[in-house]
Amino acid sequence: MHKVQTQAPETPGRDDIRPLMGNEAIARGAWEAGVKVASAYPGTPSTEILESLARYPAEEISVEWAVNEKVALDIAIGASFAGVRAFCAMKHVGLNVAADALMSQTYIGAHGGLVITVCDDPGIHSSQNEQDTRLFARLAMVPCLEPSDAQEALEFTRLAFELSEEFDTPVIVRSTTRLSHTRSAVRVGERGSAPRKAFVHDPAKSVMIPSHARARHGRLLEREARLRERFAQAPFARIERGRKDIGVITTSVAYTYVKEVLPEASVLKLGASWPLPEALLKEFAESVERLFVVEELEPVIEDELRKLGLRVEGKVWFPRTGELSPEVVRDGLVAAGVLEPPPAEEEALEIEPLVRPPVLCAGCPHMSTYNALRYLDVRVAGDIGCYTLAAIEPLRAIDTCVSMGSSIANAIGMARAGTAEKPIVATIGDSTFLHAGIPPLIDAVYNDVNITVIILDNSITAMTGGQHHPGTGHGIRGNKTHKVEYEDICRAVGVKWVRTVDPYEYGTLLKTLREAVEYKGVAVVIADRPCVIDPVKITGEPLRIDSASCIACQACMNLGCPALTWSDEWHEGHHKVKIEPSLCIGCTVCAQVCPTASIQPERTE
Amino acid sequence: MAETTLNDDAGAENAEATAARPTNVLIVGVGGQGVIMVSKVMATLAQRAGFEVKQSEVHGMAKRGGGVFSHVRFGHKVFSPTIPRGEVDVLLALEWAEGLRWLNHLNRSRGTFIADVKRIVPPFACRNRADGAPLGYSRETPKDVLSRVRTGYALNASGMAERLGNPRVANTILLGVLSTALDFPEEEWLAVIEQFVPPKTVEVNLRAFGEGRDWVARHGEVGPDEEVDFSPPAGLETPPRRPRVFIERAWCKSCDICVKMCPERCLELDEAHIARMRAPERCTGCRLCEYLCPDFAIRVLRLPQDASEEEASA
């Protein structure tokens, strides 16, 4: 599915119009701006940005997956120091990881244009929270551009580099899931020639020690004031005159919802949500009778208007949580008395929706590992990845999940608390381990904690659609590179007990996990089996269930494999099980847990 | 009936409003079915016809067998990338229950419902372990649903695709049905589909598209595909019973297998390290403990719901 979402950008013609996803448009904008170095760690909904950039020739642009977002931003910062335009992309929570670098770099500024695209996830489609990056922009005092569609995404990204160099600042281009994953027609341009400057040796600007930083802080305020003026001008601000009694200030995709449900209102569309053009806000507020702010998540613009002493209605009508939509904006305007309530619906069709949460794939190697952990009855600190799905039915095998790399240190804390009634296990994916799992593993050994760490090595960053990382031995362009060995890392940091096991061998897996849990000290188990869909879709001879001998015990169903469902036959009040041959890849894990050996290869018949 | 065009009840007085309003096609299904592919065909077609198009979907978790949806909107001006609830002109469902999930988004006075009756049963639908529990899948049949929408088609596109020798062309059959509900020339559809399918499968896809259109011509009047048996699976013949676990303490050797393997965590070892029921109310009577006990110390019986304690222990 992922493969068809991203279209390779062809050689551009002049004034070429083509359908682009928001993320592709951002990548295109960066390319047109003449970016020389781009880096990112994958994260939904931002992943396709770097993947799109990697389709441009390697001679024009260096594009690489970084081991995490902080590394990605530091690489971009380094390139900016070296005088070229640099770019990095991340999801909203990725900026938390990169925040340390951002908070200092804002003092330093940008030599070569430095642009960070951050993709927020209002509505939490595929994240652990829905934090609002605009607050980060305010905290870091860096300008934040907010495109409302793919065309603007391209143009704003390109302009962001010019702003960055003109105002000597990193620039954030904030997208959201909706913009990133909406495809619309975009007029694309040519790649411009960006200035290539030499490195400038200027320690007072580039080395943040207290005396230098103090001097730089004051310049930030001055920069902010100049940006306010710039953001009052096109294309960052646009007034669309309509009804005088209703005015709406809005930005990003929220603008399209406002135009959809209240096209006759006067609208001030902001293309930058930080810093805000105060004079223009006042002018617009005074030109309308009733002023609304429609913005997704936090009341960033609304708060600013209040500080200016303006009467404004915003979060009182529009929710501060979740994603906006035409319906939500319409409901808010109805509640505010601006719109008539929609006509009462005809008898709504009462259909109870089927519960269909995302599940692990048929044959996913994580299933047997978590199934075994459940049988071992241990406390499991989980982490971020596909395997977080093991927290829900039927595996129910994960007790906590906080942020990238948290599992191992969470386990250390649980062990140190001294209240553990069960052995403590941390489970972490391969990409997540490399992202933020190595420092806590060092800590666990250093402080001699009694925990077990399971590295779920499926040789890919699976959750985001199959991206390479240092453990796969390949780069983003498919190039071969050094492959990290997890056993070597573990031994190097001092782990004495390390085993690699194939999670498809259930008996060995269970035995190894039991030994690991019983070991006093840090034990590491590497569950080594590639992802069944990326980088290559794994297929195999499907198994079948001998219905006559199936006793409907549901032992196989406890794996949560989507290839296994109930058949129409019953055994003593319970459904027998059948295998969907189009999904089964023949991993045989279900056959290994079947107490009656009813699951067999098709061919034995 | 092959010409089930949109807005044919719009009337002259709001013809202008209709012209301004974008056409909304919502394509839904299950991860891996090709929802995004189908919506890209739709979007490309509309764009070639000179419309402004927005196509919006959410990826990520949806990839993992969850529900997937894609909004395609086209017209002279499109603002919101998502279709407001109740404004869907055509709802195209690649899977039956997903079609039902979005049914209330369909505009009831002008909308068209097109669904493959293919059922993809998620593992979640097979979770209720209670005695006699039914499959947790939607019970509505095409007859129920089609009687409640203005224009609706339910067909076994997956079965038709298999008969064509390629199960993957089910989506193209559905595109054939969709083509009868929208005003684009057939040649344009064929040209766009040809762009999107693997070269080796062009011929079978074009045939599949034709099958979809033929199907509409044959089943013109609103009605389900009579070739499809869509009755829900039979229930349990005998009334549900209450499970009860009996443990022969003298035979238990404290091996712990039943405790560890019980999916509902009903069992524990007592102070004497003998297995005992800790949460009988959670027991579903799956008998896994009985089957796995190496010493035949466990017996699981299914008793009538109203059996007294005496009867139970008899």
Image (cartoon, coloured by chain):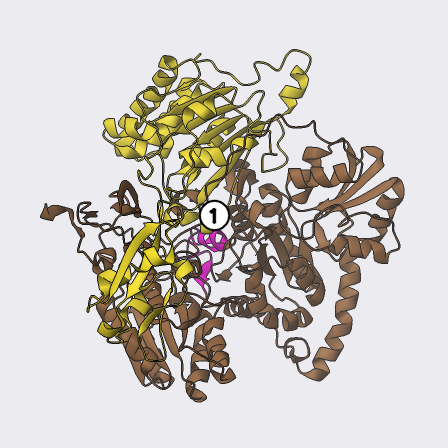
Chain colours: A brown, B yellow
**Which residue is found at the position 30% from the left and 21% from the top?**
B227
What are the residue bounds of the magenta stretch? A47-65
Q: Is residue A227 magenta?
A: no
**Which residue is found at the position 70% from the left and 40% from the top?**
A329
- To which residue does mark 1 refer? B59
Q: Is residue B282 left or right of residue A526?
A: right
The vertical placement of A538 against B179, above or below, is below
Where residue A6 sits in the image (x, y, percent)? 44, 45
Q: Within the image, what quadrant is residue A474 found in?
A: bottom left
The vertical placement of A345 against B294, above or below, is above
Instruction: Give the letter of the chain under mark 1.
Output: B
Where residue B117 sits in the image (x, y, percent)? 37, 30
In the image, what residue type sits under mark 1? Answer: His
The number of numbered discs placed on residues in the rendered structure image is: 1
Name the quarter where the N terminus of chain A is drawn: top left
Disc 1, SS: loop
Name the quarter where the C terminus of chain A is drawn: top left
Along the viewing direction, whichever of A221 and A306 lies nearer the viewer: A306
Along the viewing direction, whichever of A470 and B161 lies nearer the viewer: B161
Residue ranking furthest to the bottom: A447
The vertical placement of A349 against A151, above or below, is above
Along the viewing direction, whichever of B75 and A415 lies nearer the viewer: A415
